[in-house]
Amino acid sequence: KGQNSRMAPSAEFSVVNSLMTSLGIRTFRATGAAVKALRGLGGARRPLDFRSGRPSNPRQDVDKADLETMLEGLESQKLTWARTSNRDKAELLERCLKRMVDSTDECARRTCEVKGSYESGLGEELAAWSSCCWIVSETLECLRHDFKPPVGATRVSEGDQGRTVVETFPRGLLMNLVFLGCKGEVWLQPGKTLRQGPPRTNQEGSVWLVLGAGNQIPAVVGDIVHCLFLCNSTVILKMNPVNDFLGPLLEDCFKPLISEGFLKIVYGGAEVGKMLVNHRLTEEIHMTGSDKTFDAITWQGKKPKKGSKLRNPPFKKPVHAELGCVTPYIVLPGNWSREDLDFQARQCVSGKFHNAGHNCVAVEVLVVPENWHLREAFLSRVKHHLEKSQKRIAWYPHSRANFERFLSTFPQAQQFGSFDESTGQAPWVLASGLTTETASSGNENWCGVLQEVRIKSKNLRDYVEQAAEFCNNKLWGDLSCAVFVDPQTQKKSKEDLDYLIGSLKYGSIAVNIPTTIVFAVPSLTWGGYPGNGTPEDPGNTLEDIGSGNTVVHNSICLLHHQKSVLYAPWKPPIYPVWNYDNLNLENTARCMVRFFAFPTLANFASLAVQALFGEP
């Protein structure tokens, strides 16, 4: 199925789904308008109050003798795991998923005790947990289909590098109704055709170390699932001390795998990590984190200088890394209404507000056309929401130093709010009026700061060419980016938009939606841009690792992938759950957990009702 553009897509991507989606958009918009009108009769709803958080104390380092025992156990079980049938693995994983659903509120509560909570209360963390359940649920389907789940229609991209493009999202009528008007595609490497299968054929098994991300639990869960089920390895997960308060919860959720000896979870700082990395039984390492950590492991303090002929790092084990990025959001000019300006500004700042900006996917740079007649009006709405929103706690270590570095680089930057020593809240900071030459392009700031970069152009084609050049060649990293373009411009300037999307060298591209959502969709790929596999475009290398050298998620199991593109409607029919000021996110996200874990009609109905009440 889905082998070429002439073949009909599977039933999960049928024409009936498209018709129902069109009908659903109209129905949800009409129902949403009615709900808003009725709700207004009872008075305006308000955001929830800010609640402060407090840092957690890291858990005690694992005992060395216990660590040795755990690794020996994983070594003894690796062959058993590698030869366990997909059916039996799916049974184990489904037991884990049920435990995850039962742990939903506990996960959100524990996390907000550390990070704080804002307009949506527990909603942001509940939504994050829903993405954990989603990747597990999609992996279940992958196993049940022996790594060849249904795909949609394929096409060949236009241009001199015509690539096979595979539609992978959404699948099924209910998922189409939840993501009305959205479409997700995976672009393959030039010259490659559709093939599916696990990323690794590993019949003898192996022991992998996962160095867990410290900022977001979905990254940790996704890495566990990827290494265990797609790479067919037993896993020892070292929790990051920053968020190891969630370790016991993960131990409970994944108890079926832990009790069988296929997964172990340990705690500790840098010394424990170093011990695990260098241990004789650790065969490969998978990490989500910093390029500096990757370099420290791979090069052991002996990284060659740029231009050096040294190519063989002293550390010989494979290190698979998903790293950061200076994430750009590119705005294409158009005749936007006041409502358009405000809504897209909300979407852009929501891509910064999530997790207080402590995300590899957080927007860092707004790229706008200098000669766009609505540039100032758009920037005014961005500033409005920076001012209006509750100020987040800069909870991640070294955040204050990152703010200070940014402010020393841009002393003229505008601050929205101030540093509150009693609560830990930090301002949002905007450096506006920058050019491609004056912008800070080499460092991921990892906190609540934002740059506005203006590009002067002759016409739209000139603008998209300059924007692609700036993002590809000056901004550090190639993990993800976003493009915002109104329907009229999409229709009138299709060739320019196609050129931009085709030219952007990023692992994931979001169109009219924050990049956080591309990360959340399991059937899309997530990782750094791999290049074309040619000497001219090799992708990231050991010497210059950029955003990393591995891809996770990809629950459709496509081989030879290059990047994912997620298209969203200019304005969704119901108020987005990803916008920072969704007023019903707590209730909606609980329903998201149940639906993404088990996408039944009953769970869809519950989600649909709650989603109607989110608009402020």
Image (cartoon, grey):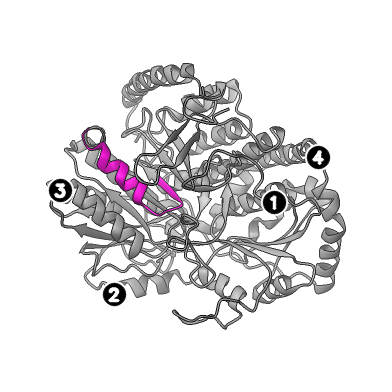
**As drawn, is 574 to the left or to the right of 323?**
left
The residue under the point 52% across, 28% down is: 175
Q: Nearer the viewer, residue 599 or 196?
A: 196
Residue 493 drawn in magenta: yes
Work out whether mark 2 precedes mark 3 in sequence or the reverse, and give the earlier one: 2
User: Marks 3 and 4, how far apart in space?
Assistant: 57 Å
Work out whether mark 3 precedes mark 4 in sequence or the reverse, and give the earlier one: 4
Q: What's under tag 2, amino acid-wise?
A: Thr
User: Marks 4 and 2, how far apart in space?
Assistant: 56 Å
What number is the disc on residue 231? 1
User: Marks 3 and 1, how far apart in space?
Assistant: 47 Å
User: Marks 2 and 3, how far apart in space?
Assistant: 31 Å
Q: Which residue is mark 3?
A: 459
Magenta residues (range): 492-509
Q: What's under tag 4, amino acid-wise?
A: Ser
Q: Nearer the viewer, residue 45 or 63?
A: 63
Q: Main secondary structure of the magenta part?
A: helix
Asked whether the beta carbons under mark 3 and mark 1 sit within 8 Å of each other, the answer is no
Asked whether the beta carbons under mark 2 and mark 3 sit within 8 Å of each other, the answer is no
SS at circle 2: helix
